[in-house]
Image: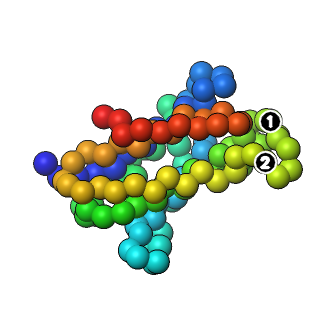
Amino acid sequence: MTGYLTTHVLDTATGRPAEGLRIELYRIDGTSRELLNETVTNDDGRTNAHILPAERFEPGTYELVFHVGDWLDAQGNEGENPRFLDQVPLRFGMAQQDHYHVPLLISPYGFSTYRGS
């Protein structure tokens, strides 16, 4: 199997997918951080393509940055200034050629993640 990475963002406060949320993907190498992809979620809270496709996959350390604050503002959910959650970075490792799915569950005051399928 060839490895690849997908994600999915759900708004737990409304029970709906987080459509239009900007996501950045970085590869981490020591203190170096290389931007690999930048995308926006579709109406299902997913990206239209794998955020890291098979042809670019290699084991290593990665970071997804979810721009939750901007998305909440766009939804009319303007929070305190500064906002409790703004950018949510998730740093994780991918050690083998496999499908890695890293979903994010968000609300204005919390988030959770896990390795999905």
Q: Indicate the secondary structure of the residue bearing disc 2.
A: loop
Q: Is residue 89 left or right of residue 60?
A: right
The residue lying furthest to the left in this view is: 1
Q: Which of 56 and 98 is in front in this view?
A: 98
Q: Residue 22 carries which label?
A: none
Q: In which quarter of the image is residue 7?
A: top left
Looking at the image, can residue 6 be seen? Answer: yes
Q: Nearer the viewer, residue 81 or 78?
A: 81
Which residue: 19% across, 53% down?
A: 97
Which dot marks residue 83?
A: 2
Q: In which quarter of the image is the C terminus?
A: top left
Q: Nearer the viewer, mark 1 or mark 2?
A: 2
Rendered position, 87 above or below 29: above
Q: Residue 38, how many percent across, how many down?
A: 51, 59
| Tag 1 near tag 2, CB within 8 Å | no
In the image, 14 versus 45, the foreground residue is 14
Residue 9 percent location from the top left of the image: 52, 37
| Category of crowding for the residue at label 1, using alpha-carbon neighbours closer than 10 angstroms: few (below 14), some (14–19), many (at least 20) | few
Q: Is 52 rendered above or below residue 107?
A: below
Q: Earlier in the sequence, mark 1 or mark 2?
A: 1
Amino acid type shown at disc 2: Arg
The amino acid marked with disc number 1 is Gly
Q: Is residue 81 positioned above or below 14 on the image?
A: below
Mark 1 — residue?
76
Residue at 78% x, 48% y: name it.
83
Please tell me which residue is depicted at 40% across the width and 67% down the height of the picture. 27
Q: Distance between the residues labelled 1 and 2?
A: 13 Å
